[in-house]
């Protein structure tokens, strides 16, 4: 059964905030132009979303996606209280982006985009971002990735990409360096788990462009 939204974030309304009923939320969005709001099943997700850019959430598909809920319901081995991360690349190298979502709901936690990169780099940065995100928000939940290569790089604390460092990729390489430094200077206890695509289907963080 899909989780019911119990908390409503209003980013742009009569009185922005977090509301615990749809009725209160409606009062604060009625008649507002360019209104931005979204429902969440847990207070934790709502509080995190309220502090972030509403464009990461507003206009996105319903977090209680039926396909995702069917996947989770059909596979009891999946730890639902977790983050899932994934990357997408238009060409390899090409325009690259990655994101992290809450596995149980598909709610986006973070997203980043780069002018030029590779899929493996995106997968690596997504895991590191997921670890740093959890530290920032005082979370301690597993992270799922469908990339064995990225998981190997995380263990080595080194991005082993052969992408050329050029003017076009300089910003990306600076981000890679910060990610490697983060791994070297921070400890974490969250398990990084392999998402079994053949058994479970696409990871919840998948961009759906295959």
Image: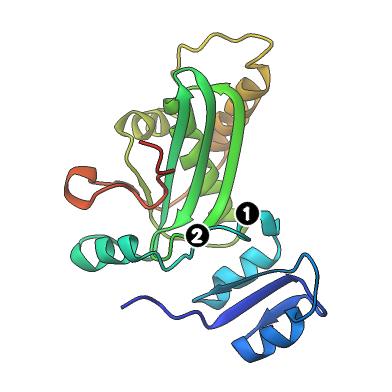
Q: Distance between the residues labelled 2 and 1?
A: 11 Å
Identified at 20% across, 62% down, the residue is 75
In terms of depth relative to the viewer, which is nearer, 193 or 65?
65
Q: In this view, does 142 lie to the left or right of 59?
A: left
Where residue 109 sits: x, y (%)? 55, 55
Residue drawn at x 34%, y 66% is 66
Q: Who is closer to the viewer here, 100 or 157? A: 100
Callout 1: helix, strand or loop?
Answer: helix
Which badge, 2 or 1, comes first in the chain's sequence? Answer: 1
Q: How crowded is mark 2: few (under 14 residues within 10 Å), some or many (20 or more)?
A: few
Q: What element carries label 2?
A: loop
Where residue 121 appears, as percent x and y from the top left, is 47, 26
Q: How many labels does the image show?
A: 2
Q: In this view, does 63 lie above or below 42?
A: above
Image point (47%, 28%), residue name: 89
Q: In which quarter of the image is the N terminus?
A: bottom left
Left/right placement of residue 170 relative to residue 186 reads right
Q: In this view, does 117 lie above or below 64?
A: above
Q: Is residue 183 visible?
A: yes
In this picture, residue 110 sits left or right of residue 171? left
What residue sits right under mark 1 in the picture?
A: 56
Residue 31, above or below 33: below
Residue that badge 2 annotates = 61
Q: Residue at x 34, y 30 (%)?
A: 152
> Can you tell which mark lies on residue 209?
none
> Quadrant location of residue 104?
bottom left
Q: Position of residue 82 (x, y in %)?
A: 40, 60
């Amino acid at each position: 059964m899909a989780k019911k939204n119990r908390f409503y974030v209003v980013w742009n309304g009569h009185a922005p905030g977090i509301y615990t009923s749809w009725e209160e939320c409606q009062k604060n969005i009625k008649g507002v132009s360019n209104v931005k709001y979204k429902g969440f099943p847990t207070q934790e997700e709502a509080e995190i979303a309220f502090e972030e850019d509403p464009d990461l959430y507003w206009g996105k598909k319903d977090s209680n996606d039926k396909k995702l809920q069917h996947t989770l319901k059909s596979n009891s081995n999946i730890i639902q209280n977790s983050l899932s991360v994934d990357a997408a690349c238009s060409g390899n190298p090409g325009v690259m982006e990655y994101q992290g979502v809450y596995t149980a709901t598909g709610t986006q936690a973070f997203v980043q985009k780069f002018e030029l990169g590779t899929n493996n780099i995106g997968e690596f940065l997504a895991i590191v971002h997921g670890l740093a995100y959890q530290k920032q928000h005082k979370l301690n939940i597993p992270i799922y990735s469908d990339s064995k290569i990225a998981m190997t790089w995380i263990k080595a604390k080194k991005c082993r990409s052969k992408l050329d460092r050029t003017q076009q990729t300089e910003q990306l390489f600076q981000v890679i360096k910060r990610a490697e430094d983060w791994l070297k200077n921070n400890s974490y206890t969250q398990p990084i788990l392999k998402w079994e695509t053949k058994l479970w289907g696409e990871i919840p963080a998948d961009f759906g462009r295959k």
